[in-house]
Image (tube, rainbow, N blue to C red):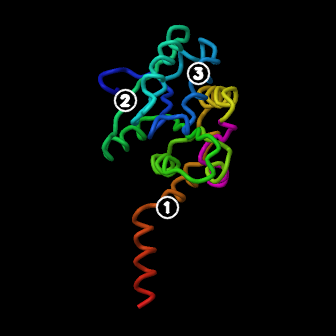
Amino acid sequence: MIWGLKLREPYFLLFGAIDGRKGIHQILDAIQKLSSDWGRQLCLVLVGESKIQQQLEARITEITASQPVQIIRNYQFVSEEEVWSYFRMSDVILATYQKHVGMSGILLLAAATQKPVLSTDFGLMGAMVKQHQLGLSIDSTQPEQISEGMMKLIGASRNDFYNPEKMRIWAKQNSAENFAQTIFAGITNND
């Protein structure tokens, strides 16, 4: 439950600055393309500050008028403790960045909490998702591929799309503790 609301499952989380860079427009287009049967099974949770909140609210009102999807919004900064809570209770993490060549901490949070991602197949993120079996990678610029990915993740065991052991190892390799040990070892070895 979030804010006293019962969430439908599966719960898809889009976390961080909610803007076009993260693919929110393509996600909303994808949801609009789902059949009512698939829409009834979906809860989209948006968590993070947004400079386009008014635009998003207008679009969400339009979508929920014609589609039985549940869309929960929290357009504010959340504490680190709350971040972990959102990730732990989610079923799928959305990492639908648009032509982003780099990496995102979202993938590490998903791996650390053992949650599959629906991610861009582009750049370093796409490579990490494939290499470490973090979830399903798609062309996130295409709403049709996002909706197909959502249906795959709703309709099948999410274990078909990710490897919990590889996720655990990758998250541990990239943990803050491991990073600090590597830095400290580098400093002490140079003395």
Task: Name the secondary structure under disc 2.
Answer: strand
Disc 2 to disc 3: CB gap under 8 Å: no
Q: Residue at x 61, y 50 (%)?
A: 125
Query: Which one is in front in this view, the residue at disc 1 or the one at disc 3?
Result: 3
> Which residue carries the number 2 mark?
74
Q: Which mark is residue 31?
A: 3
Which of marks 2 and 1 precedes in the sequence? 2
- Other-residue count near label 1 (Cα within 10 Å), few / some / many at <14 / 14–19 / ≥20: some
Q: Quadrant of the C terminus?
A: bottom left
- x and y percent of residue 130 in the render? 67, 50
Q: As displayed, is residue 50 above or below residue 178?
A: above
Amino acid of disc 3: Ile
**Magenta-colored span:** 127-140
Amino acid of disc 1: Asn
Disc 1 to disc 3: CB gap under 8 Å: no
Amino acid of disc 2: Asn
Disc 1 to disc 2: CB gap under 8 Å: no
Q: Residue at x 41, y 82 (%)?
A: 187
Task: Judge whether residue 130 is colored magenta.
Answer: yes
Which residue reaches farthest bottom?
191
- x and y percent of residue 162 in the render? 61, 44
> Which residue carries the number 1 mark?
174
- x and y percent of residue 23 in the render? 57, 34
